[in-house]
Image (cartoon, helix red, strand yellow):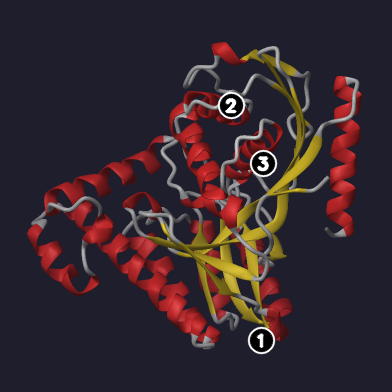
Amino acid sequence: MSESSAAAADAVAARFEELYGSAPDGVWAAPGRVNLIGEHTDYNDGFVMPFALPHTAVAAVSRRDDGVLRLHSDDIGGRVVELAVDDLAPESDKRWTAYPAGVVWALREAGHAVTGADVHLASSVPAGAGLSSSAALEVVVALALNDLFGLGLRGWQLARLSQRAENVYVGAPVGIMDQTASACCEAGHALFLDTRDLSQRQIPFDLAAEGMRLLVVDTQVKHSHSEGEYGKRREGCEKGAALLGVDALRDVPYGELDAALARLGDDEEVRRLVRHVVTEDHRVEQVVSLLESGDTRAIGPLLIEGHASLRDDFRVSCPELDLVVDTAVSAGALGARMTGGGFGGSAIVLVEEGDVPAVTKAVEEAFAAAGFTTPRVFEAVPSAGARRVR
């Protein structure tokens, strides 16, 4: 554990003791994630390729056996929120507490005897930046409760339950990628995940060793998955699958895409959604092949191609994200694309190590010229998934 991680764990544990009057039973951490490629494919049973960030949600937690759940977050402030676990019900809570409370609800609904907890949280994952701050919050609570109550659940199972918490309890129709990345990623690797059967392959991804960097550019444009546009895209994908007679768009072969689009007739909205998902799954497979063959620089054009598809077919980009991609590529980046659900959030930029200052400066100057909020730029380093830290 790094010195900064240890310091964060110590700070969260100390604050827990201030709030609740005793030391926590333990401290856990779960990361946010960046998705290298494979956007809006997870709820279509497709392929994704995220990796974990060093930014984490940290939770100090103690077990309770009296049916009381107490929650506090340094990021939100305010008083400790106290809930009765027997009273937890889907979509009954519109506050931040819905995310950890939803995990308790999901575990109990699945038959696990979780009888309460004291929880204190602090997160360094930027909220609303498309980096899965909510998934990190869910997974860290799920892992802590798994350990404290001896549930014996594996990472992918915790991810499934965390996804159910967000889908049903919070009411956001997210796929399985974010929670699985937070729970299962390994340092120095990207996670090739088949979201249909949750089979995983850890793909070595050490850009620094090859003289490259991957930058995250947080546009500071906030988004919310529980708002309607994300749900509309998901419904449109489900409609496309139904019209094509398949279980999910993942089942449409890339080589048969033109024929599938022709069968959809003049429903242009559904045609665009189908085209994005099928081509994006193909791009994920291409990136895996290139990384495994050691041709990492060749993934750059696929990132650019993926952004164009998200912008033009899936229509989830925004002017700030487009400006990042266009400016970075013009300034010499190997590739760039938006990452995350869209409608704001972040873009990723693949760049030669020596070009980092010039590309960063170009993006910041372009934002200033456009009158946009100054973006936050940082390096994305593939990091470890959820774990106990003390």
Relative to 67, is 122 on the left or the right? right
Residue 4 appears at what percent x and percent y? 87, 55
| Label 3 to label 2: alpha-carbon separation | 12 Å
Can you identify the residue that label 3 sits on? 140
Can you identify the residue that label 2 sits on? 104
- Secondary structure of residue under mark 3: helix
Residue at 47%, 83% (x, y): give it: 290
- Secondary structure of residue under mark 1: helix
Of the two numbered discs 1 and 3 on the same chain, state the one appearing first in sequence: 3
Residue 323 appears at what percent x and percent y? 53, 65
**Labels 2 & 1 near each other (Cβ < 8 A):** no
The quadrant the C terminus occupies is top right
At label 2, the amino acid type is Val
Residue 232 appears at what percent x and percent y? 32, 41
Q: How many marks?
A: 3
Can you identify the residue that label 1 sits on? 210
Residue at 63%, 62% (x, y): give it: 217
Relative to 153, is 195 on the left or the right? left
Residue 353 appears at what percent x and percent y? 70, 83
- Secondary structure of residue under mark 2: helix
| Label 2 to label 1: alpha-carbon separation | 43 Å
Residue 325, above or below 196: below
Residue 143, above or below 56: above
**Labels 1 & 3 near each other (Cβ < 8 A):** no
At label 3, the amino acid type is Val
Relative to 195, is 373 on the left or the right? right
